[in-house]
Image: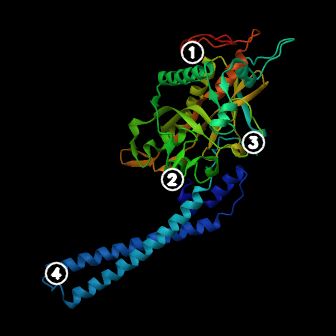
Amino acid sequence: MLDQRLLRDNPELITSQLARRGLHLDLSPLQAIALQERDLEARRSELQAEGNRIGKQVGALIKAGAAAAGPEVQALRDQGNAIKQQVAELEEQEKALETQLREQLLALPNLPSADAPDGRDERDNIEVKRWGEPRQAAAGEILEEHWQIGERLGLWETERSVRIAQSRFITLQGQGARLERALISFMLDLHGSRGYCELLPPILVNSASLTGSGQLPKFAEESFRCAEDDLWLTPTAEVPVTSLHREEVIAAEQLPLRYVAYTPCFRREAGSYGRDTRGLIRLHQFNKVELYWFCHPEHSAAAHEQITGDAEAVLEALELPYRRIELCSGDLGFSASRTYDLEVWLAGAGAYREISSCSVCGDFQARRSAIRCKQGKTTQLVHTLNGSGLAVGRTMAALLENGQQADGSVRLPAALAPYFGSDRLSAAA
């Protein structure tokens, strides 16, 4: 959530930065609400101070021998009661304005970082790094896409999954289920060896958790809700991990806090129908290993490079060619101020596809979730960062397409073989 003080004192800065996202807003009505709330708060504070002064005056008179029911004391008490009534009325007005202001601020995205390149959409994103040699089909060779390989090797079942749920759900089976489990364990172990604390959080989250991470109110239609409870199926482990320290003050010497969490994730994928309808790329339910940092504001830029490097370490260990893309201001996610996307090479499709987004969110989520750090007498909002480390289904897709062999089998990288129990997938297994 954006800083209310910035809205009051410098709305032009917010307007100019949101324009970098392609949002052109008139914030003057919102600023007027913020200024009105500040004035009410100042008036209430003055009245409360006056009420306290009167209370002390009453006490002093009684101590000096004045009758508690005497006219002078009673007049002061009447004055004090009138002030209490005014304070109560002002508090109600403040509360109404605060609610109105918060609802509107919650709908505004984060401001782009000064380091994020300007641009309108994904066409203006910048490639900053490549790793590995993308596999190309040799002469006379036909490379299959992952969904073709998976169906041929019997790695998953789609038609029966529609019977169980609906379209865009999948049942992994046999080698496919074992490979998914191997990938999750491999990723968690790798990140654990790099200093992350492993979490297994709830996958049902309440509205406050979704609001704190920035999913609500913006993405309500993208999420699955349990009708009888204030609970939602989590769209990403970023949501429960953000709320792990909601409304807490963390000692600065404890920072950074670095977590890795595996969860199933659930998304409606509204607006994506007709795209990636086969295979593992765009499902309503998928597994993901998420990286998450709480850090001191002074260290968030360096943390962004490190969390991105930790996600890249998975791709490199799995021998998967990838590229790092820096998103322009117009393509940033709602809560992000700066983002690197990692795109893995899919040899069968002959294209790079996103497999991780690593974002620094500044104090945007921390303000929504009331997460602070304290150093000495100074208390300030922490900075949060998140990144997929990685999306498991898309990792499997990349392994299938890049590891496919002429005999129809799929070679697995050496780092994964101990987890899977073999270095190869084959139709005979």
Q: Amino acid at mark 3?
A: Tyr
Query: What residue is pinned by disc 4?
Result: 62
Disc nearer the start of the sequence (2/4): 4
What is the distance, in whole Å, between disc 1 and disc 2 at their CAs?
Answer: 40 Å
Disc nearer the start of the sequence (1/4): 4
Disc nearer the start of the sequence (1/2): 2
Q: Which mark is residue 228?
A: 2
Of the pair 336 and 99, the residue shown nearer to us: 99
Residue in the image at 62% along x and 50% along y: 219
The secondary structure type at the circle numbered 4 is helix
**Mark 3, residues whose alpha carbon is within 10 Å: few (<14), some, or many (≥20)?**
few
What is the distance, in whole Å, between disc 1 and disc 4 at their CAs?
Answer: 83 Å
The secondary structure type at the circle numbered 2 is loop
Q: Position of residue 272 (x, y in %)?
A: 73, 42
What is the distance, in whole Å, between disc 2 and disc 4 at their CAs?
Answer: 58 Å
Of the pair 256 and 100, the residue shown nearer to us: 100
Disc nearer the start of the sequence (3/2): 2
Residue in the image at 56% along x and 26% along y: 310
What is the distance, in whole Å, between disc 3 and disc 2 at their CAs?
Answer: 28 Å
Query: What residue is pinned by disc 3?
Result: 273
**Is 412 placed left or right of 55 in the picture?**
right
The secondary structure type at the circle numbered 3 is loop
Measured along the vertical axis of the image, is residue 327 above or below residue 230? above
Query: What residue is pinned by disc 1?
Result: 420
The reply to whether callout 1 and callout 2 are in contact (CB within 8 Å) is no
Q: Amino acid at mark 2?
A: Glu
What is the distance, in whole Å, between disc 3 and disc 4 at their CAs?
Answer: 77 Å
Viewer-side label of 1, 2: 2
Q: Position of residue 177 (x, y in %)?
A: 59, 23
Of the pair 99 and 156, the residue shown nearer to us: 156
Q: Amino acid at mark 1?
A: Phe
